[in-house]
Structures are given as C-alpha cells and as structure tokens.
Amino acid sequence: MKITGGRIEEFLRSPPDHVRAVLVYGRDEGLVRERAARILGRIVDDPADPFRVAELSGRDIETDPARLADEAAALSMIGGRRVVRVRESAETAHKVFASFLEHPVGDNLVIVEAGDLGPRAALRALFDSAERAAAIACYPDEGAGLDRVIAESLAAHGLAGDAEVRGYLAAHLGSDRMVTRSEIAKLAVYMGESTTVRLEDARACVGDSGAASVDELLSALGTGNQDALDRALDRVFEDGTAPVGLLRLVNRHFQRLHLAAGHIGQGLPPDKAIGRLKPPVIFKAMASFRTQLGIWTPDRLTDALDLLLAAEADCKTSGMPDQTLCRRALTRLAQMARRH
C-alpha cells in the first residue's frame, strides 16, 4: 500500500502489525535513512543489537535470494520481533521481495531502503499494491515543508530565527534531510548560549564561504553571466560541494522561479508574486530574483527543470566525471538566459 501525506507520520509512529515489509525510497537519501531508522526504532530498542537486527545490502539478496526469507523467518535468541534492514536495494531485486511477500514466514519486519524510483518501477509498484507491504516516498524538502523542518530543527536546539534567517537557511539546505539537520546542529554549537539566530550567524556558519559563492552562482546562472558563473563554480567545487547536491539546489531555485512566474501569469505583479514564496527570498537576493523573472518564461523554466533532472541522472549513471556534467548543464542554462 502507498503511504502518502499525513498518513506518513501516523505510519512512522505506529507501523501496522500486518505489514511485513516497508519500502522507503526517494531522491532525499538522508530522509530515506531517517524514516527507515524511525520505523526500526518502533520495533527494537537498540538498532545495533545483532540478535534483533539483521543488516543486508541489495547485493546480498541479489547474489543469495534465499537469504532474505531466511533472515525474515529467524527467531531472536533473546525474544522480541526482529528487523531485517536491506540497504541500497536495486530495482532488479523486486522478484526476491515479491516471492517473500507471497508467503512470508514469522512476524519479523523487513525494511528496504532504495534510491529514486519512477512510477513504473517494478519494486515501487510491488510495494504500492501488496497488502502486506507499504511504500513511502522521500522527496527533498522544499517550500513550506523545508521551512517547517528548519524551524523544528532550530527549536530542537533551543534556537529561533526570523523569516529572513530561515529563508537564507532554506536557500542553502534541503537537498538532503540529514545534511540539513547536521548543518543546524553545527549552527547550534556556533551559537553557544545565544538562542536567537541572526542572519550574520547563519552566514558565518552554514555553508561557510561557499554560501556566498552559491548566491553568486544562482544570480549569474539565472541572468546568463557566464564569466561570473565559471568563477562561482570554481569556488563552489573547491569548497567541496557535491555536483549532484548543487544540481538539486539549482533545481529548487528554478522551481521557485517557476512558481513565482505562475503567480505573475495569474495577474499578480512581480513583487507580490515573489512575496508569496515560502520560505521568502532573502533581501540580498531580491533584485537578482526579480531580474531573473523577467528573463525566464514558464515554458523555458520547464525546459530548464527537465535539463537539470537529466543532468542529475547522468551524474549517477553515465560514468563521466560529475563535475564536468554539472558544469556543462549549468553552462547550457546560462546560454538559455542569454538568448533572452
């Protein structure tokens, strides 16, 4: 069965007893791990307990298909329900899981972690439709959802920040839930006993010098300034930013442009259209964002988003250097902006 929307939190708090296997998948690898760990925590007290938890890889069950059923049927020597956690499961393993779900033995729970799966993927379709299985998709945090995660993470450390602070954090976080939480934990250490995060605190800690480079990169990219884009890309890669993470960050930026362009198409003036974005555009980036809205039409933004998704897929599957692929994709976007 497919678990979506508000049902996800309910499921994570109390997985139904009849469910024997859960697929947690998506582009946000950190959120996949976080949700899988939450489900695991509802079944066993200690995730490192070898008597209650069996760790398998996707490779393990592909080379030895019987191992999944054996581990799922095994009894704990100290009593209690066991969990079989399968990490990095491949799409090609769907037949192994189908066989297990057809005749599951015992009451142990299988938790399967996978990457991004399309709607037609056999593994996703299996877990979406099977009565004794559940599937939970994990997409990168964005918009109001990202703002909520940031606010909750700040509050967990006894911190608070205004809309501009949260907007800055949202512009530099969100591609991976665990990275978001880790960066805010780092910010909490930086803050010491202070509880109110100012914009200069966020700039000083989250993203460090790379944050300014990313701001410059998005502005150069959206306005078609190739020289500035090349300089910003050099700095961002020198700071250790992963190409896939950068592509996702650019993707979120273009999604926000697309949303604002849609508001303008419905008759709102640009400033009001920008004002509807959640989290808000930070003041420093406002002028550039307004300029970019004058360059990118909704149709061209759709083309840009398609290009970015294709570039991310190429980074993961083509075998070519991911920095080269990322740079090539962003150069093409800058060319599209200049053609305006």
Image: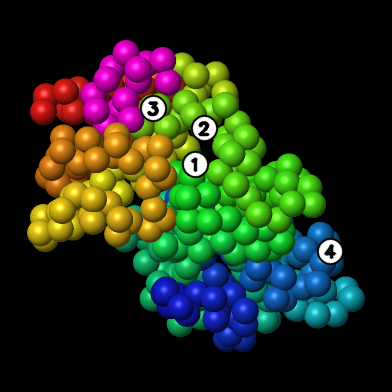
Image point 45% across, 31% down: which residue?
214
Q: Quadrant for the N terminus, please.
A: bottom left
Image: magenta residue range: 219-232
Q: Residues within 10 Å of mark 2 (few under 14, many from 20)?
A: many
Determine contact: label 2, label 1, CB under 8 Å: yes
Q: If the image is split into quadrants, where does the C terminus sit? A: top left
Disc 4/disc 2 C-alpha distance (Å): 40 Å
Give the foreground label among 3 and 4: 3
Tell which circle, 2 or 1, labels the residue nearer the N-terminal end. 1
Which one is in front in this view, the residue at disc 4 or the one at disc 2? 2
Using the image, tell me which numbered label, if any, was put on residue 49.
Answer: 4
Residue at 58 percent across and 55 percent down: it is 161
Q: Nearer the viewer, residue 29 or 173?
A: 173
Residue 217, numbered circle = 3
Residue at 49%, 29% in the rendered image: 212
- Which amino acid does the dot numbered 3 rest on? Leu
Q: Is residue 65 magenta?
A: no
What is the spatial separation of the Cα atoms under label 4 and label 1, in whole angstroms?
36 Å
The reply to whether residue 268 is visible in this rendering is yes
Amino acid at pointer 1: His
Question: Residue at position x 68%, y 45% from top?
Answer: 187
| Res 211 label | 2
